[in-house]
Image (tube, coloured by chain):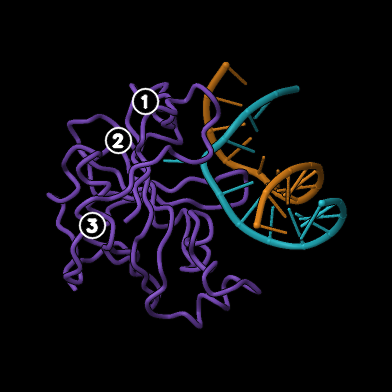
Chain colours: A purple, B orange, C cyan
DNA sequence: CTTTGGATCGTCT
DNA sequence: GACGATCCAAAGG
C-alpha cells in the first residue's frame, strides 16, 4: 500500500482520471476500490464548478494539485474531488463510486438500511459510508485523514468512457469524461 | 423493474 | 430567488 505521490496528480486531468480507477481510498479504518470517476476541466469546461472563474467555494480547484476539494451537493451530500494538474487550471477528478474492501461493518452503520452493493456506489454515498466531509479539504498527499493508495492493482487498459452524470443540458454532454473499468 | 417527487441549503445572480 | 457534479422512499407496471 503506497500513497500516490503528488507527481501522480500533477498531470492533465484526462490522464489522471482513468488512472485513479482501481486505486484504493482509505479513511477512518475503512477502504474501498475506486470504480467510477469523472473528469472536470477548469474555466473552459461548462460542466465544471470552475467554469466561471474562482469563487469562494471553488478557490481550492485553482490551488495546487493533490488537494481535496469537497463540496455540498443539493444541500445534503458531500462529494469528494481531487484537484489535479496545476497547468490545466482548476481541473479536478470527482470520485463517484468505490467497492468496499475493509471496514464494511462501519460502512453499514454509517449508511443505515441499504444493500451492501449500495453502500458506496455514488459520490454522496461514499463520503457518508467513509464518514468524512468538508473537514478534509486540503493536502491529500502529506497529511490527509483520507488517502489514496496503490495496492498493485493495475488501472484498466481500456476503461469505458461515457457522459458525465447529472449535468443539465448544454453542459458539454459531448465530453465522455466519466470513466469506469 | 421504472418513474416521480421531496428533502435541504450553500452558492451565485 | 433559482438552481444544483444527489439520494431515497413510495407508487405504479
Which image quarter: residue A142? bottom left
Between tags 2 and 1, which lies in front? Answer: 1
Badge 3 is on which residue? Answer: A156
Q: Are marks 2 and 1 in contact (CB under 8 Å)?
A: yes
Between tags 3 and 1, which lies in front? Answer: 3
Numbered tag placed on residue A91 in the rendering: 2
- Circles 3 and 1 on the same subunit: yes
- Circles 2 and 1 on the same subunit: yes
Q: Position of residue A163 (x, y in %)?
A: 42, 37
Q: Secondary structure at mark 2?
A: loop
Label located before the other in sequence (3 or 2): 2
Between tags 3 and 2, which lies in front? Answer: 3
Badge 1 is on which residue? Answer: A45
Q: Secondary structure at mark 1?
A: loop
Label located before the other in sequence (3 or 1): 1
Q: Residue at x 19, y 42 (%)?
A: A15
Left or right position of A173 against A18 = right
Q: Secondary structure at mark 3?
A: loop
Q: Are marks 3 and 2 in contact (CB under 8 Å)?
A: no
Q: CA distance from mark 3 to mark 2?
A: 22 Å
Q: Residue at x 19, y 74 (%)?
A: A1
Left or right position of A169 against A94 = right
Label located before the other in sequence (2 or 1): 1
Split into 4 quadrants, where in the image is the C terminus of chain A? bottom left
Q: Is residue A111 above or below residue A140?
A: below
Q: Counting other residues with Cα less than 10 Å from the Cα at mark 3, is it few (<14), some (14-19), or many (20 or more)?
A: some
Q: CA distance from mark 2 to mark 1?
A: 9 Å
Q: What's the chain of the residue with tag 1?
A: A
Q: Residue at x 35, y 38 (%)?
A: A177
Amino acid at each position: 500500500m503506497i500513497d500516490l505521490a503528488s507527481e501522480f496528480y500533477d498531470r492533465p486531468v484526462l490522464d489522471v482520471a482513468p488512472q485513479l480507477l482501481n486505486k484504493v481510498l482509505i479513511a477512518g479504518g475503512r477502504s474501498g476500490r475506486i470504480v467510477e470517476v469523472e473528469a472536470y476541466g477548469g474555466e473552459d469546461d461548462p460542466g465544471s464548478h470552475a467554469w466561471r472563474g474562482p469563487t469562494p467555494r471553488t478557490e481550492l480547484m485553482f490551488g495546487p494539485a493533490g488537494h481535496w476539494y469537497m463540496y455540498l451537493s443539493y444541500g445534503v451530500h458531500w462529494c469528494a474531488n481531487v484537484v489535479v494538474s496545476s497547468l490545466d487550471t482548476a481541473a479536478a477528478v470527482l470520485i463517484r463510486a468505490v467497492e468496499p474492501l475493509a471496514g464494511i461493518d462501519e460502512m453499514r452503520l454509517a449508511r443505515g438500511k441499504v444493500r451492501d452493493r449500495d453502500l458506496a456506489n455514488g459520490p454522496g454515498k461514499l463520503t457518508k459510508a467513509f464518514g468524512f466531509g468538508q473537514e478534509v479539504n486540503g493536502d491529500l498527499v502529506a497529511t490527509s485523514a483520507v488517502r489514496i493508495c496503490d495496492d498493485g492493482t493495475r488501472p484498466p487498459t481500456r476503461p469505458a468512457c461515457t457522459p458525465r452524470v447529472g449535468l443539465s443540458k448544454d453542459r458539454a454532454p459531448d465530453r465522455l469524461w466519466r470513466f469506469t473499468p
